[in-house]
Each structure stands twice: as C-alpha cells, then as structure tokens.
Image (tube, grey):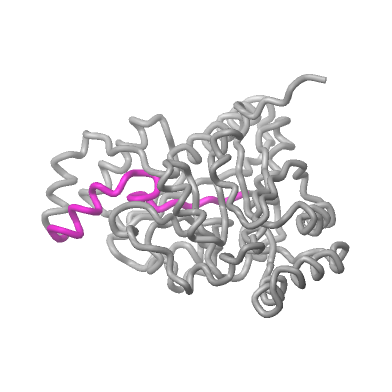
Amino acid sequence: MSTPDLNESLVVGVASSALFDLSESDRVFREQGVVKYEEFQAENQHHPLEPGIAFPFIQRLLGLNALQENLVEVIVMSRNSPASGLRVMDSIKHHDLPISRAIFRRGLGAEDFMSAFNMSLFLSANEADVRHAIEAGQPAGQVMTSSPLLDHEGESLRIAFDFDGVLADDSAEQVYQSEGMEEYQRHEASRAEIPLTPGPLYKFLQAVNKIQTAEDKAVEQDRDYKRRLRVSLVTARNAPAHERAIRSLMSWGLQVDDAFFLGGLPKSTVLNVLKPHIFFDDQQRHFEGVSAPAVYVPFGELNKTAPSAASTAAADSEQED
C-alpha cells in the first residue's frame, strides 16, 4: 500500500464544534461536569449530531473530489476524548461525509498539528484555539453563532473573503484607523503598484485556486461541464484603493471571480444576494444582518485582545469541541 500524500490536497481541519451542533452536549458538560458529559456522549453515540455552521461548506468542499481524486481532505480536530469522539465519527458516517482522519485530544486543542498535516485552513467555534493558530502564523477562523445555510440545490460552492486582515495583512487598515479615510485613500493610491503582504488566509485561497485550475481543465475536456467553485471578494475598499487590492492578488498569483468594492456600505447588501456557503472577515461588525455562515478571522492590530467569555462560551470547555 502506498503512503498517502497530503501535499497536493487542499487540507482543512474542522473542529466538531464547527461541523456539528453541540449545544446540547455543551449544556450537559456545563451543568453536570466531565463524567456526566462523557456518559451522555456514550449513551447517545448512535444518535447523530445535527449539522453545524460549517457543515454545508465542508459537505460541498468534499464534493469537489468528484472532479479529481484527493483534491480535498478534511480532518476532524477535537478536544473530545477518543471515547467521546466516537459519537462525532458516527455522526460523520450518518451524514455520509467522506471524512476518515481525526485528531482527538481530551481537553487540549489540536491546532499545533496543522503544519504536520499541511492544512490550509482550521475552523472552530473556540476563539482561543483560533487565536492560538493565527498567532502561530496558521490560517484559521472562528465560526460564529448563526444558522447553517439551508441550500440543497445544485453542487456549487460559493466562498467569500474580505480583503484587508484576511487575504492581505492589516497594514493599510492601520493607516485608516490612525490617520482617517482621506489619508488612507491617498496612501493606497500612491502605493497602487506595491503589493501588500499576504494575510492569514492567503494559503487557503491559493489552494482553492488550484482546484479552480482543475476545473479549467475539466471545461477544456468537456464544454458541458458546469463549474462548481466560485470565489468572491467583498471589501469596504472603493476607488482609488481598489487598485492596490487587485494588483496585490495578481502579484501573488491569486484570483477571484467577483469583486465587490462597497466603500463602507453594509456587506449584508451583497452577501444576502450572493449567499456564500462561507464568508471570512476580520471584523465582527461586518456580520450584522448577514444570513450567510460567518467566520471571524482574529488577525491584526484591531483584534489584539484576549478572547471574550461570551465569544468562547459555547466551545471553551475541557471536552467540548
């Protein structure tokens, strides 16, 4: 048997707190403690967990393997004990997700193992774990409390990104915060041809673009092939600051299918029409009014604060994740 190689795959690590709805399990843990929690999971091993915020995204991402074998690999990363993790794996089987690899670390995060598996993204509901990954230079995001996108039509996968602090670093954002809009626009216009430094999710978009290249080949071979993957940029930038964003992507060898330069308009105006299966932004205020599954990327100067009790309440227990 040949040794599996993940170097050519888009590898995503997903916590059980992002993949499934663990609210009932978390309540048992908080009200009754570790022992009762583990008993509860054992008793309910064959009762499948309901889909969580990231479920539709993960499901459709894995569906891209129909285009080419081993394009995508998803690995469960959990704070559950191996025994409690049996319910997670049974739920994966119930929902017919082709996920076979998992990391269970009772009471500990697994994000330190991202590089060992060549991961391009880690999703969790636990802000502390996500911040730890970001601080280590790894691509990660915290799924926010909302309803999963109920989209059962077709096989397409729509991904939306903010730009500054997500695909790019936050150096331009720092100019805006410290010197205001007028100086920010002047700063960006004068540096339009100077690429920004890649940000935390650069590696993820790079891996997504590789899959789009595979789709390009599929179109060449079969003109009836319908593309599944679409990537959109949804940013508060507008002219003249738009040019630096586009040129930065081009200099990095990356691309998007759509670009929305909103100039401060609410992002919900676009996202609620676009209906992405996942949307990444480094500022939580941009999630207001957005019905799409939202992922917070706690990167940069604006996000240099300790995790709040409220933001980690649903996923910061010893077992839950």
- Percent across and percent down for residue 122 are 55, 48
- The residue under the point 71% across, 68% down is 34
Residue 44 vertical placement versus 165 (above, below): below
- Percent across and percent down for residue 208 are 54, 38
Quadrant hosting residue 210: top right
Task: Give the side of residue 22 with respect to residue 297, left or right.
Answer: right
Q: Quadrant of the N terminus?
A: top right
| Callout count | 0
Task: Give the side of residue 175 with respect to residue 300, left or right.
Answer: left
- Percent across and percent down for residue 149 are 62, 64
Residue 173 visible, this orientation: yes
163 inside magenta stretch: yes
Residue 9 vertical placement versus 39 (above, below): above
Given residues 51 and 136, the one toward you in this image is 136
290 inside magenta stretch: no
Task: Give the side of residue 54 with respect to residue 137, left or right.
Answer: right
- Percent across and percent down for residue 72 are 66, 37
Given residues 74 and 38, the one toward you in this image is 38
Residue 268 visible, this orientation: no
Residue 321 vertical placement versus 314 (above, below): above
Q: Quadrant of the C terminus?
A: bottom right
Quadrant hosting residue 267: bottom left
Given residues 83 and 196, the one toward you in this image is 83
- The residue under the point 44% across, 63% down is 270
- The residue under the point 43% across, 64% down is 307
Magenta stretch bounds? 157-180
Task: Give the side of residue 50 with respect to residue 187, left or right.
Answer: right
Give the farthest residue toward the bottom: 31
